[in-house]
Amino acid sequence: MDLPTYPVSPMSLSAFISKNLDEIVDEWETFAKTLLPVAGSMTSLALRDHCRDILLAAVADMNTRETERERATKSKGNAPLGIGAETAATEHGALRHLSGFDLVQLVAEFRALRASVLALWKRRESIGAQADGGAGASEVEEITRFNEAIDQALAESVDSYSSAVSTSRDMFLAVLGHDLRSPLSAISATGRLLLESQLSDEARRDAAMRILRASTAMDLLISDLLEFTRTQLGSGIPVEPTTCDLGPVCAAALETIRTGNPEQSFEEHSSGDLVISGDAPRLQQALVNLLSNAVQHGDRGRPISLIAEGADEEVEVRVTNLGRPIPASALQTIFEPLVRAPTANAESHEQSKTSLGLGLFIVREIVVGHGGTVTVQSSMDAGTSFTIRLPRAHDFSTHT
């Protein structure tokens, strides 16, 4: 892209940033969209995030007198955190972690911001230098102060990002311990009950169902943990495609969830040609995760629907529950690992039995491996619907 031409009149770097703030923020947003797939679904506001405030904080910093010691401290990223707008970089790092950016991508944003600002300014400066016979003596000072300000903002963002990672890790371990202990306790208590010789046949059947539900919950949790570990090691979730009829796949997924949740009602409907090239066990796993999520967050007194429809080029599968809607702020990150969408005033029965926040992440990875997409819509009237769209044919060579 050709860089714009600016007026020749002398202008400091800080004044240049202030005057061209919108253009710089636009470039920040454009670059952020290229960093990872989830950025393509993020809103413009989420991508821009705190860029404007970070730049304004840099401008304020550049216009503030500092001692040599203060500048040396800042250049090492050890300056004390500021107040107001200067904390924008700290918030930016934490939010980028929540949005699924890794540390390399976070640093790349600041690298691109620095390069963009300096390239645009040098373009104007070179024109001014040709007209005036040379660059101003303060140019090196201007660039140095700008770099120091960006380095400090980067250090603040990285620090808050790292803190968010540590918090997620601690939460992961705490929830893992809780979610494994709960079904284990149920199995242990039921096992002791079964040792009693006076139990009726009905009581024994109820006990067996409790053990089955607890075992199903543990199996789902362990499966998600294994798949998540596989993706973190870089190998991804393997997909082995064959001719796959999604009708039986949907039925098998429903049966799995019904077994562990006999009190929940379900509605199933299918139409059209549901045959695709796909990995039936993996797709069943994805649907089990979606149905499990619907049970955990839906209204227990209202049915969960599973609808599969075949079209000419693709097959669509939709899982809908009529529980409390997902907040709009959570829709952008709901498929990220270790992210759990909050619901206002959630009741105890709505708390996830496998609440590590991995289930929807696994769904996305499986669907993407099939060349498909998964989206979510949530409202008070229509409930929460997760829609999977799968092409009938796909090149799996890059996913196996």
Image (tube, grey):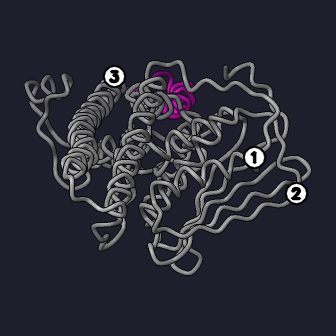
Whole-number angstrom distance, CA of label 1 to CA of label 3? 64 Å
Instruction: Report x, y in % for residue 114.
Output: 42, 30
Image quarter where the N terminus lies is top right
Which mark lies nearer to you, 1 or 3?
1
Which residue bears the numbered disc 1? 246
Q: Nearer the viewer, residue 81 or 364?
A: 364
Q: Nearer the viewer, residue 35 or 131?
A: 35
Check residue 272 in the rendering and tell me which mark sits there, or answer none: 2
Which mark lies nearer to you, 3 or 2?
2
Amino acid marked by disc 2:
Gly
Q: Residue at x 61, y 23 (%)?
A: 238
Q: Residue at x 75, y 27 (%)?
A: 241
Which residue bears the numbered disc 3? 140
Image height of 255 relative to 320, above or below: above
Instruction: Report x, y in % for residue 50.
Output: 38, 50
In magenta stretch: residue 127: yes
Q: Is residue 12 left or right of residue 126?
A: left
Instruction: Report x, y in % for residue 242.
Output: 79, 28
Q: Is residue 295 left or right of residue 280?
A: left
Q: Is residue 240 left or right of residue 176?
A: right
Image height of 339 relative to 112, above or below: below
Residue 369 in view, yes or no:
yes
The magenta-colored residue range is 120-136
Residue 90 in view, yes or no:
no
Whole-number angstrom distance, CA of label 3 to CA of label 2? 68 Å
In magenta stretch: residue 319: no
The answer to which quarter of the image holds residue 275 is top right
Q: Nearer the viewer, residue 291 or 127?
A: 291
Amino acid marked by disc 1:
Leu
